[in-house]
Amino acid sequence: MISDILQRAADGGRISPEEALLLYTDAPFHALGEAADTVRRRRYPDNIVTYLIDRNINYTNVCVTACKFCAFYRAPKHAEGWTHGTEEILHRCQEAVDLGATQVMLQGGHHPDYGVEYYEELFSAVKQAFPSLVIHSIGPSEVLHMAKVSGVSIEEAIQRIKAAGLASIAGAGAEMLPERPRKAIAPLKESGERWLEVMTQAHRLGVSSTATMMMGTGETNAERIEHLRMIRDVQDKAVANGYTVEADLAGTVGGFRSFIPWTYQPENNHLKGRTQATSLEYLRIVAVARLFFDNIAHLQSSWLTTGKDVGQVSLHLGVDDLGSIMLEENVISSAGARHRSRLTELVQMIRDADRIPAQRDTQYRHLRVHWTPADDPTDDRVQSHFSSIAIPGGGTGRSIPLTPVSS
Ligand code: SF4
């Protein structure tokens, strides 16, 4: 039974949520990984694994939503609340561009005063100063929040921020989409259905996105698979309706370009790390995701939350993208993610997994393929947490020491 399901999935057939759950809980690990990697090899016969250079820039940590897993936010009027002005954000964009970044992820809390106008001004300023820098930012939660603050529809909010320069919506805020675990960890956040509804509207309006999953806050195995099902169903509709016209390298259309699972980090938040996902649970969901998402082209693993060795192992379980070098990251790092890397190391990790590294852009187009080691980048200045308020020693524009490889 399990071997039949694995064979069908490896051959490109669709598997049901029930079958995905069975594979997740019971399939032999090596057989599961082999099937997932078979799918990756068929989709990407060039054996390329991509990475991105980008910077997560936070405009404020003030937030009214108070998610229990979040270590980043401060309630309005809290003494540790802060905002960054446009000038500071542009300074950080300049640093990112100087280090070869092609994308910025502007990310922040649900500030009670930030409506659509704030984002229009911010995105316009970034695009005016850096026309070629891609803004892959905010998530459905922020769209809902800004629409509410400004008293406009979701559609109008998306159209206006798209016109101001937003190219892609981040899959942020998905956490766990099923109702029970979502309410348990983020009771003030929109429902999972609503999160998907905003994504659908964005896809319909020509703004594609990623999709994420945060695992490890006490959700059941069935709820993890249900999260995948909810995303796959929405992607099915996007494909059927012809939403977004961009065809990626694998020829797939649809609103979600990639799926990115990551693990909850235990420090400085209300959940206090009482539950956490193990590395094996993470790797199994990665493999199942590759088999289950026959309609989403790319699968990205999260070395930031799982560690670099788990990230590298994931490349043998169907993953074709190792994500970003993340010149700056404060949200997950505030909750305890201490893994750091540099561009040269990330490329070597891909090469050591017997894959060909390539720098990509937001839409997964290859910018530089490092066909041989002689083509590998050598600039050691390009490193994660180049600037960070979450890691001791981090500061704008300062190079700070790397921690050893660990997971
Ligand atoms: S995860 Fe986002 S919405 Fe939730 S508290 Fe943190 S900053 Fe606010």
Image (cartoon, rainbow, N blue to C red):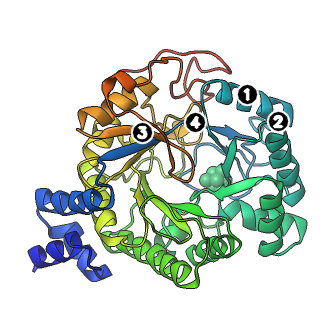
Identify the residue under disc 4.
329
Q: Which mark is residue 129?
A: 2
Where residue 151 sits, quadrant-wise, is: bottom right
Q: Which residue is mark 3?
A: 358
Q: Are marks 1 and 4 in contact (CB under 8 Å)?
A: no
Report crowding for label 2: few under 14, some 14 to 19, many 20 or more residues within 10 A (C-alpha). few
Which numbered disc, 1 or 2, marks the residue that appears first in the sequence?
1
Q: Closer to the N terminus: mark 4 or mark 3?
A: 4
Say which label, 2 or 4, has the lower sequence index.
2
For marks 3 and 2 on the same chain, the one whose residue lies earlier in the sequence: 2
**Label 1, on which residue?**
94
Q: x and y percent of residue 254 in the render?
A: 53, 72
x, y percentage for residue 332? Answer: 53, 42
Secondary structure at badge 3 equals strand
Work out which quarter of the rendered image holds the C terminus and state it.
Answer: top left
User: Considering the image in quadrants, where does the N terminus appear?
Assistant: bottom left
Classify mark 1: helix, strand or loop: helix
Residue 23 found in image quarter: bottom left
In the depicted view, which residue is nearer to us: 373 or 287? 373
The reply to whether callout 4 and callout 3 are in contact (CB within 8 Å) is: no
Q: Are marks 1 and 2 in contact (CB under 8 Å)?
A: yes
**Of labels 1 and 4, the one closer to you:** 1
Tag 4: amino acid: Glu
